[in-house]
Image: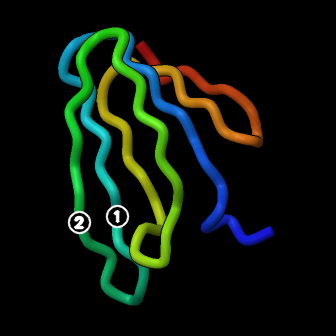
Amino acid sequence: MSNQNEFFVIKAKENGVNVIGLTRGSDTRFHHSEKLDKGEVMIAQFTEHTSAVKVRGKAIIQTSHGTMDTEE
């Protein structure tokens, strides 16, 4: 299974959580961003364009590898 098919879930624990998608390739750049408010959930997946995701703020992140909580 390619990790391009892998979904992950981000649930905001406070208002203003930023979810930022980063591009693939030799020149990594921001290409998409979302702002979540407390209680909002975003379901996303890696694609041919997205190789990494940065989460800024208090959130719970669930993947097939487990659940993690951002530091407070």
Circle 2 residue = 31
Viewer-side residue, 23 vs 1: 1
**Which quadrant would the C terminus be assigned to in this image?**
top left
Provide residue 33's location: percent of width, then percent of height.
Answer: 22, 49
Q: In this view, does 35 lie to the left or right of 62?
A: left
Residue type at mark 2?
Answer: His
Name the quadrant containing residue 3: bottom right
Q: How crowded is mark 2: few (under 14 residues within 10 Å), some or many (20 or more)?
A: few
Between residue 71 and residue 37, name the one nearer to us: 37
Q: Verify CB contact (< 8 Å) between mark 1 and mark 2.
A: yes
Name the outermost residue toward the right.
1
* 72 lies above or below 6: above
**Tag 1: Cα neighbours inside 10 Å, few (<14), some, or many (≥20)?**
many
Closest to the observer, 18 or 34: 34
x and y, in percent, of residue 47 in the image:
49, 69
Say which element carries label 1: strand
Q: In this view, does 22 lie above or below 16?
A: below
Q: Residue at x 44, y 21 (%)?
A: 11
